[in-house]
Image (cartoon, grey):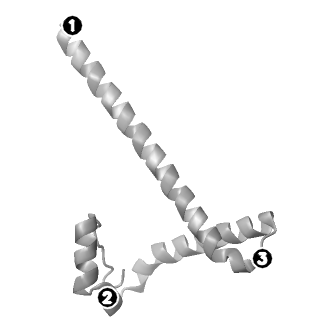
Amino acid sequence: MDQGGEFVSGALRQFCSDAGILMRFATRKRSQQNGVAERANRTIDEHTTAMLAESGLPPSFKGEAVAAYIHRLEDERHQVSSQTRAHEVSAAVGVCRSCRSE
């Protein structure tokens, strides 16, 4: 977020705090920090345009395609995160077992 007025209202800050969302702001007047967001937006646009072309749906379904693409990304992140946690727990259990056998 770029610290524009729409993102720094007390109501939004409270909502994010209640939901456990960490707000991060870019430095004002530093357009270099917009590159990551711009690239993410471009990637989403490219993927959803391809999804619509492949499915034969008209451009009016762009909003639904974006929602589906973001949902898929979040699902993949959750799966990777869960697999990592399971691996870390397995490793910790293995360490505990080796400590007991000594």
Element class at badge 2: loop
**Side (left or right) of 49 relative to 87:** right
Could you tell me residue 90's position as x and y percent? 34, 26
- Classify 10 Å Cα crowding around label 2: few (below 14), some (14-19), many (20 and above): few
Could you tell me residue 58's position as x and y percent? 77, 76
Q: How many marks?
A: 3
4 in relation to 70, above or below: below
Q: Earlier in the sequence, mark 3 or mark 1?
A: 3
Query: Which amino acid type is marked by label 1?
Result: Ser
Residue at 31% in and 78% down: 25
Query: Which amino acid type is marked by label 2?
Result: Arg
Element class at badge 1: helix
Q: Nearer the viewer, mark 2 or mark 1?
A: 1
Query: Which amino acid type is marked by label 3?
Result: Pro
Residue at 61% in and 76% down: 63
Q: CA distance from mark 3 to mark 1?
A: 64 Å
| Outermost residue toward the right in this view | 56
* Label number found at residue 58: 3
Please identify the quadrant where the N terminus is shown: bottom left
- Classify 10 Å Cα crowding around label 1: few (below 14), some (14-19), many (20 and above): few
15 in relation to 27, above or below: above
Could you tell me residue 14's position as x and y percent? 22, 76
Q: Nearer the viewer, mark 3 or mark 1?
A: 3
Quickly name the residue at label 2: 28
